[in-house]
Image (cartoon, grey):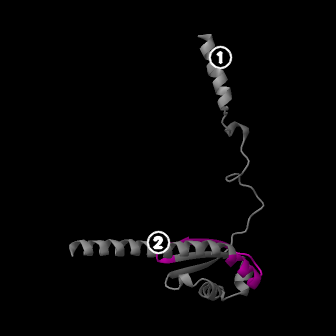
Amino acid sequence: MKKFCKCLFRAAFWGAIAYFGYRFYQRVKAVSGISKSMPLFLKNVLGEKPSMALNLAFSSMHIVLGFSKETLEKEENIEELVREYLDDFYPVFNGMSISIKISEREEESGEDDGCCSDEVADDEIPATTSASEEAEKNEADSEKE
């Protein structure tokens, strides 16, 4: 009897791990789908593609959407629209706590302050050598000795 209970407990334990792992996999897969489809949906409905950030935790999800000032003034029910979209197309999130933050997107300025430039000055690039060049140097050093 003890052996049977132990076997039953192990089966239940691994079954629970598999079940919750599969549910988490479904949520992660749905988040990747949301990150692709929601901006297109909002562009079709509102006329502007938002900047978007998604964070998924075990029991909650945080969505941050950035729109221009004109769109925020024109549309007041963006949060309701997003919640309805999630309820209709992604029912895997029905039991989760979802927080949606709608903010004004920061406009990209034409000025370059130099802090995040993609260009790197020549003196900042370290000199690198390939493996073959290093091997030639080592051979030359060993021949000198």
> Residue 140 got which mark?
1
- Residue 19 spot, x, y in % from top left: 45, 76
- Amino acid type, mark 1: Ala
Tell me whether the residue at label 2 lies in contact with that at label 1, contact meaning CB atoms closer than 8 angstroms. no
Q: Residues within 10 Å of mark 2 (few under 14, many from 20)?
A: few
Q: Nearer the viewer, residue 33 or 9?
A: 9
Helix, strand or loop at label 1? It is: helix
In the depicted structure, whether residue 116 falls above or below residue 39: above
Q: Nearer the viewer, residue 131 or 50?
A: 131
The boundaries of the magenta stretch are 37-60
Which residue corresponds to the image point at 69% horizontal and 77% vertical from the top-left?
A: 37
- Residue 20 spot, x, y in % from top left: 45, 75
Helix, strand or loop at label 2? It is: helix
On-image quarter of the C terminus: top right
| Quarter where residue 36 is shown | bottom right
Q: Nearer the viewer, residue 75 or 39?
A: 39
Q: Which residue is mark 2?
A: 21
- Residue 114 spot, x, y in % from top left: 70, 51
> Residue 98 got which mark?
none
